[in-house]
Structures are given as C-alpha cells and as structure tokens.
Image (tube, grey):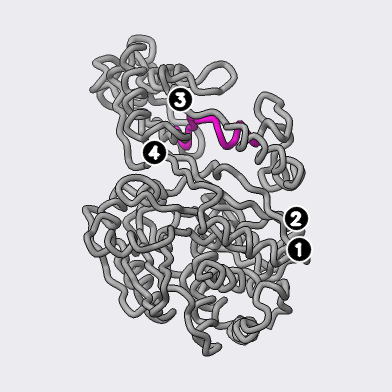
Amino acid sequence: MATTRTHPSLLAGDLSSIQSEIEKRHDESIQRLQHWVRNPSIAAEDRGMDEGCDLMMRMAREAGFQTATRIDTDGHPGVFATLDAGAPRTFGLYFMYDVKHADPAEWSSPPFDAAIVDKPGFGKALVGRGAVNQKGPEAAFLAALHAIRGAGQKMPINIVLVAEGEEEIGSPHFRQVVNHPDVASALRKTVGVVMPGAGQDPDGNVSVLLGAKGVVEVELIASGEAWGRGPGIDVHSSNRARLDSPAFHLVQALATLVNADGDPAIEGFGREASPATPEQKKMLDTAAERLSEDSAKRLLGAKRWAHDKSWRDSLEQFLFTPTVNIEGLVAGYTGPGGKTILPHRAVAKLDLRLVPDMTYDGALERLGAHLAKRGFGDVVVKPSGGYDPTDTALDAPLIQAQIAVLRRAGIEPAIMPRIAGSYPGCVFTGEPLRLAAGHFGLGHGSGAHAPDEYFVIEPSNPTVADWDGAVASHAAYLFALAN
C-alpha cells in the first residue's frame, strides 16, 4: 500500500475512519480504475459504447447508487443514477464514460493497458487513455463513496448522477439525457453539478474554476464536385497544370479565418464576447502570482506565449479570448513516400472555443457567412457537436464549499474565472435549470487527448495529493457541501 499524503485536516475527527478506509481500499480502487481504462468506450469510433454504458451503470450501483438507468438518445446512451441518503441536500454529479481515440504507436505504454510506470519528475503514474480525462478523477470519486460506506458513515448528501458517452465528440445528444423528465426533475432539486477533476498543477498549486469555454467542433470540406472546379476524382498530379486544386482552395479558405498573428478573423466572431470585469481581473492578478509560469510551460513543452505576452496577460488571453484552431488537415495521400496525385477532396477539422456571451449557433452562423462572403460558399461546413460557455458565481455554495475544503487543508487556491477547455456544463447552468456548476478534486494528471495521458498515483512532490489524497478530497467535499 502506498504511503498516503492526505492533509490531516481533510478527513479529521469524526471523519478519520473514512481516511482509514480509503487507505485500506487503496489497491481495490486502483484496480477499479485500471479495469475501467482497459475497457475503452470511444464514441468517435463507435467502439465499446454499449459495454461502456453497462460498466458505468454497474460501477454506480457498486458505489451505492440505488438506481442506475440507461437513457437512450439519438446517439450513444447516457446514464441516470440516484443515491438517496435521506439527507436534506442533494448534489449533482456529471460523468463522461467515453474517451478519445489513441494511436498505440504514439504511446510509450499501450493506451489501454493502464500500466503504472515511473514518470520522471512526477512519481508513479497510471498511463492510459482516460487516465485523467475523465476516468481517474471519476474513479477517485467512486472510491470516496465506497470508503464512506465501508467506514460505516452515513452518506451526508443525496447524489444525482448524469453520465454521457459522447463528450469527446462534442456532446451532440447530452441535452436529450438532461431533458428526460425524470432526470430534469431530479437535477432541479440539487445545489448544483460538479465534474470530478485532478485540480493540482505538478507543483501542488490548485485552481478553483468558475466556468468553462464553449466549443464548436466542425469539419470544412472542399471538393471538386461542390466547387465545380478541379477534378471530381483523384487524378495524376500532372493535371495540376490544367485543373484547379480543391486542397489549395481549402487552404486559402482556412487562411481567411485568422489574421497574420493567428487570431480569429471570422467576421463578427467574438463580437458578443464579454471582457474581464474588474473583479475577474483581480482574480487573474492573484492567480498569476500564485500559479507557476514555469510549471505551465513545462507541461506544454512551450517556451513563450503567443504575442510574447507576459504570464499575467497570457492568462487573460487564455480564458477570455475565443479561438479558431485546426485539429487536423487531410487531403490526398499521407502514407510513406510520395504519390503524385491531385486530390479531389480536402478536409479540415476545426474547433472554435467560445467565451461568454458567445453561442454555439451564433459562431456556426458567422463561420458559414464569412466563408460565403469571401468566395468559399462551396466549402461544406459540417458541425459534429459543441455547446455554449458556462459561468458560475463565486458565492455559489458549490464553489464556497470547495474553497473551504482546500483552506482547511492548508491550500490557498487560485480562483479562475473559467477553464479554457470545454465541457457541456451549459445544459446545467443555462435554461431551464440555471444551476451552479464546477469542477473539483485534488491530485495531478495531464495529457488529455494526447499520447501518454497519465494520473499520478504516488507523487514525488509531497505537495501533490497522492491517489488516496485525491479520494479523500472528494469525501471531504461531500461533507462540506452537506453543511
């Protein structure tokens, strides 16, 4: 069993039996996470989705949820589970059971082996797709429920769990899960909804997050057929002398989406974006002092920020600026060596990140209008998923309970207006529910969507919570919320 690094004030006094139970169940909870990672559910590949939904329901029941129901949608199913503790207060929980795909050739440890390896500079870490996004934090939360029950403690709060299997493709059908009459009725009774996370930087710093950017995931497709120029099939590249190139047509269209500095240039895109308020600027001032620029750059493998901005200004850019990003660009032959063809079709996969008060529908509309106005109306705009940004007030009980838990543990968190990533929290914070929503959990992991994704189990830095500390943070949070 690993030596625990839980701050004693996380689960002290009457709750110390839960700490003991967490340590006793250490191996069991790690094995649960490994089993989960070894059973991938990849919505983009339609792989293992029914099995992933079944496993999600089984894990919920094993953790103490009395009910766990499959909610079918026009896409992959969701899960609705309830844990009725007879408590006066109810807490909403958001899970995703899907993960990004992974190319084993890019990984140092196979992505679905869930191996625990020595990671220099970090300690022992579980490496696998979903390790931090999101199975590691979610498994830590479930382990907290096992420990509370195993210690003979009464669950302090009722829990409503909603899980989806399509977060990694933009949650195109998650609103159908949340709008199910039974689910919506249960969520309305909650104090808000939290997504478990691994909220520590590798240096031990912690951020409390008040929202998230929205996202549009979309493909732009240029083809000879739609354009009416160039070939209608792949042809020998000698024909480039007499035929136009759909691939260059797409590249030229893409070049209009950003300016020379790489910032968005889609006409009207970001017009509604709300700048940082004076209160948010103060948050960023404090965060820049509390968080380590060196740690951030090390995690990213970066040497400088865009526009050579300072650390403080880069944080504001990160959280308050909409973006246009090319995820992938494919045309013609991409295998070894050359193949002299003129492709008839080219595809760019984009994501657009949105800040309040931008909307998914508005961003898509502006993208299409921009392309048409600049002579690229033939380029097909094919959205695949996405959602609006979210915001939650600092004084929401959901957030204040997080700050209280951290301060009791001797951690003064950085309060951040939002994360620059995205999740479908708008279905909770928007109409008709208008709930608070956030993220919480100690521990460190990184590499989401990238090779060698990891969650640290035994950190080399004593200020970073180990696995048992991450589990304890969720247990402590439940009791704080209940009070």
State the residue position of label 1: 463
Image location of residue 93, percent across then percent down: 43, 63
First-in-chain label (2 vs 1): 2
The dot on residue 270 is 3
Q: What span is colored magenta in the figure?
A: 315-329
Amino acid of disc 4: Glu
Query: Mark 4 to mark 1: distance in Å?
Result: 37 Å
In this picture, residue 114 sits left or right of residue 269: right
State the residue position of label 2: 203
Are the residues flagged by discs 2 and 1 in contact, CB closer than 8 Å? yes
Residue 314 appears in the rendering: yes
Camera-side mark, 4 or 1: 1
In this picture, residue 469 sits left or right of residue 336: right
First-in-chain label (2 vs 3): 2
First-in-chain label (2 vs 4): 2
What residue do we see at 33% from left, 12% from top?
373
Amino acid of disc 2: Asp
Image location of residue 264, percent across then percent down: 50, 23
State the residue position of label 4: 217
Amino acid of disc 1: Thr
Query: Mark 3 to mark 4: distance in Å?
Result: 16 Å
